[in-house]
Amino acid sequence: MGLRHEEFCQLTIEEFQAVYDAWQKQKEMQTQDAWERMRLLATICIQPHLKKKITAKALLQFPWDKKKTQEGAKRLTQEESEKRVEELMKRMEKGKGG
């Protein structure tokens, strides 16, 4: 992670967790970048042998492709989440009484 021993010893648990999370995310991004480049190269190599055009994602899908589409979905604010829970509770109460 690049921390000297004295720096490591001065960190609180929360600070260490934040440093570790950032380091881990950087490693994941480096790995994903390498795989993305390989996928693009594979697409370029195979394209002349296909009749139809193909995209890199269509040729080879990675787990993080699915995560990105899920993350792209609208995230609710705390207020919106609470409002949806209240509406759900009201519907459930109506269903019990009827």
Image: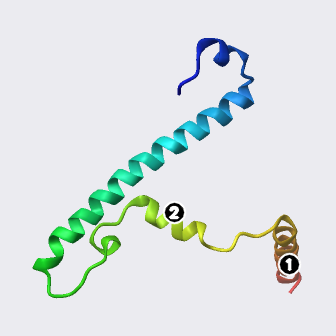
Comparing 7 with 62, the one in front is: 7
Q: Position of residue 5 (x, y in %)?
A: 60, 13
| Residue denoted by label 2 | 67
Instruction: Place residue 77 in its image quadrant.
Output: bottom right
Which residue is located at x 27 percent, y 57 percent? 38
Of 49 and 90, which appears nearest the observer? 49
Q: Amino acid at mark 2?
A: Lys
Residue occupying image coordinates x 59% and y 66%: 71
Looking at the image, residue 74 sits to the left or right of residue 1; the answer is right
Check disc 1 and report its element: helix, strand or loop. Answer: helix
Q: Nearer the viewer, residue 71 or 25?
A: 25
Label of residue 95 in the image: none
Q: Which residue is mark 1?
A: 87
Residue 26 is situated, as x and y percent measured from the top left of the image, at: 51, 43
Q: Quadrant of residue 13?
A: top right
Q: Dot 1, how many residues are within 10 Å of its Cα: few (below 14), some (14-19), or many (20+)?
A: few
- CA gap between label 2 and label 1 equals 28 Å
